[in-house]
Amino acid sequence: MDSKTLDEAVTAASSKIITGGGALVSEPFVFIRQNHLPSQCMQSIKQDFYRIFDGYHEELTAYARQKEKLREQLSGCIESEPEARIAYIRLQQGLKKGRVEIDKIPKLDRVDTDLVQSIQSHLLGKQELDRKADSLRRQFECQHKQQEELLYELFRTQRSVQNALLLTNFEMYCSLNNSYNSKKSGKVWKIMMRSFAKTAPLSSYTSNSILGDNKAGSRINMAQWILLALFDYFLLLPEVIRISRFRVAYELEPGGKALMTTGSGEPKQVSQGLYQREKRRFRMTDPRLQELSSGSIVTFGELAAILGEDSGQLDLTVRKLLAAGYLRNTLESKAEHLTLASLIDEISSFRIASERLDRLVRHLEALHQIAGRMEQTAEVHRRESLVRSAQKHVADCCETVMWKGKYPLDPFNEDSYMSIKPHEIKHALAAEEALEKWSGIFPLFDYRLMFRRYMGHLLKDRLPASYSELRQTLSGYADVYEKEAAPRRSFRGTLFETSEDILRHEQLKDRYRELLRPAESGKDVALNAEDILALKSGLKEMGITRSATAQLLIQPAKDGKYVVNDFKNSYLAYSIYHDPDQHERILRRIRAVLECDDAVLLTYSPSCGFNPNVNGFADRFYLTNEPPVMDNGTFGRKAEPVDLNECQLEWNEAHNRFELRAENLRGIALYTGSLAPACLPEDYRNIALLSQSGFLNGSGLEYNEISLDDSRKVGRISVGDLIIQRRRHILSSGLIENLTCDLDGYSAFHEVLKAYGIPVYSFVRLFPVRQGRLHIEYGATGIHKPIFFDAEEPLYFIEMLKHIQRSRKQYGELAVVLEEALPNPYETEYTAEYVYEM
């Protein structure tokens, strides 16, 4: 038996049907991303202050109880012993003031001496408590200062934290390492908290695996948005324009007097990470432009003959036509799968055109070498030197292509997800039984599934039809879905609710929501097998049996519990990107899951600036929305391009799905990227909504559906040992906004925690409150992200209070959400999150 046959046999043997709930659960692909900031480092900051404070607080409480007891005793004596009434009144007044002048109290000889001694002893105790309070205030300030210094020292000495910051925010890395003062303590605290215990999901600040004990290393890639911008600028260089070929694209205006085009202008400064071109419509009246038919290919020389312009003037004209979208450089389609290596290959074919292009290639080649050296380097100071060298090469590249705006300072991304085998983490598979039961109702939370079914019924009588013919209809319904249904996670109140299928689906969700109702009033909810089976049966009656694949982000917690941070249908997107050596095996798994033995997969992953969208994954064919230029190759890809605009859209009744047909090919579109459809270009968004599932929302109570007065408690939601929502205590910021950053504020805050039964360890999120409800501010920085909070420590209290107060100034009224610290990062050596794809 050869290796391929053996691999197929192993895959088949490991992909079983677990008969308990009837759902197909195959051996998962599992990845881990681990924070390499050990808990013992953070626990070294903890000291005895809280124990001393708690002891003082108990004494203070006992003192208050004794004072109240003495006051009641004196009040009784005033009524029962009128002959000594004046003495008891004076004693009561002295007790209230905290000072009794024994010599000045008349008729004191008629008062029980034991009572007088108790009052004197009590007042001496108050003096001792006052001395302890003064000492505590000094200790609080001293401990805060010590903890701030210790945390900064940890920040400086933990190379994993330094490395993560180096590669994600170079300016902050320099700012915090080159100089430090107490005003920067908040930034250090947030960085350390994210590095120590970030959850749901782990942040880019997560420490990278090459710096820990694991020897698997990591992969360094140049940031995709930088490559896209460089490529766009490259295409506008005069020497490139003169030897390029262009595709003409326009629509005739009614009446034929003008041309309508769609262009994105010239490259401009963009937000880091996401590089999308904003498109505009242009009206062009030059009659010479109609001499070329739309879709034709033209060279610079041919344009010169048609337009009658010399080379110098034509350079500017072509740039304007490119910006307006009348001309499209035939190389543009290659940007969908742009990597540093492929960019070097493409530009190298032009390097003989000018010394400038030769210089550009040399800088890009140097960047490629630096990325390789960084993968083999663990020392932060060495990596810093390589980053600085890379920045110089990036700056030279930007200068060469006449980049407009600020040059990038963070040129690289690092992939630190490690692929591991299930048997290596047996403890994390222990929740498999609960997971299998729960997975049977995943389609209940898949809103895109209902969109696809609606469109299937709507277009049934029009299919098969060309995609181009249906584009306007598809885009219109996709816009409504993205603007109305997706944000509210409901089809009610939209045009989609006319569908019987969607109404039944909403009713099933109502039944599920009824099961969760006790959690709204703070009670824990444990979903049982009978409830899940009933919901699964309801889905089956609708012809929905299961979701194809699922991706779950899980953290093992104490006592055999497992916390689900996030879950979605993924079609193995993590596996495709983070385990490139497994592409053949992944393809076989996807074909089996999608039951497409008699169809081909048409993969697509259009880049919008995020590196995970460029993964080199393709079957025999890949989908494009640009007519392929075959003589220019396919940018190193072995697969053949299939033009979406040349495809017909079909409905497969047997599999209840949309499919594409291109001549004699029947294909299933498979998006292998990581961005939500709303972030993709229009055509790819339409196809993604028709063919892919996404985030599965509604398994618990969503933040933006929670109302708030002063406080609220939301219960835990679980299925067996699987926790799908942590307990939450939600406080209005008004309860704590006036606290001071000193012992008095610290004490008052702990009174709030005790009054509402909130534990001292929690994950804190902040949400603006709009019209009495928690509100998600998309794109906002500094809020929503969970931060581990240890209320025992003065430093944590002060920094969290400052964080809340700053956010309140910016966003107004806030809800402070304190989620149970599950898992408690102090209870494990390292915080880790597992990514399951099954």
Image (cartoon, rainbow, N blue to C red):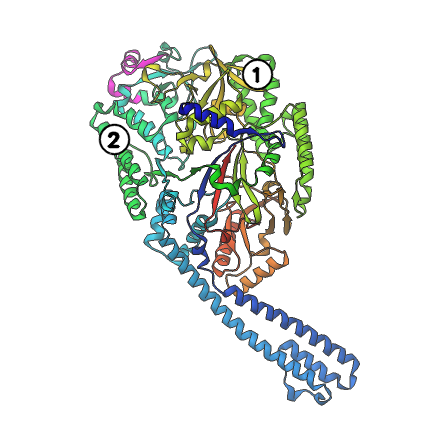
On the question of residue 814 being in view, the answer is: no
Q: Which disc, if any, is residue 652?
A: 1
Q: Is residue 248 above or below residue 480?
A: above
Q: In this view of the protein, which residue sits in the foreground, 124 or 32?
A: 32
Give the residue pinned by disc 2.
360
On the question of residue 369 being in view, the answer is: yes
- Find residue 68 and report its image quarter: bottom right
- Find residue 353 and report its image quarter: top left
Binning the other alpha carbons within 10 Å of mark 1 as few (below 14), some (14 to 19) or many (20 upward) gives few
Q: Provide the secondary structure element on which disc 2 rests.
A: helix
- Disc nearer the start of the sequence (1/2): 2
Q: In this view of the protein, which residue sits in the foreground, 181 or 443?
A: 443
User: What kind of residue is marked 2?
Assistant: Leu
The N terminus appears in which quarter of the rendering?
A: top left
Residue 427: x, y in percent? 52, 43
> Which is the main secondary structure of the residues drawn in magenta?
helix
Residue 283: x, y in percent? 42, 19
> Label 1 vs label 2: CA separation?
50 Å
Binning the other alpha carbons within 10 Å of mark 2 as few (below 14), some (14 to 19) or many (20 upward) gives many
Tell me which residue sits at (45%, 53%) in the image: 39
As drawn, the residue found furthest toward the front would be: 1
User: Given this view, does label 1 or label 2 mark the residue nearer the observer?
Assistant: 1
Say left or right for 532 vs 49: right
Tell me which residue sits at (56%, 58%) in the image: 738
**Magenta-colored stretch includes residue 302:** yes
Q: Is residue 130 above or below residue 541?
A: below
The span picked out in magenta is 296-316
Tell me which residue sits at (28%, 35%) in the image: 367
User: What kind of residue is marked 1?
Assistant: Asn
Q: Provide the secondary structure element on which disc 1 rests.
A: strand
Q: In this view of the protein, which residue sits in the foreground, 35 or 330?
A: 35
Residue 183: x, y in percent? 41, 56
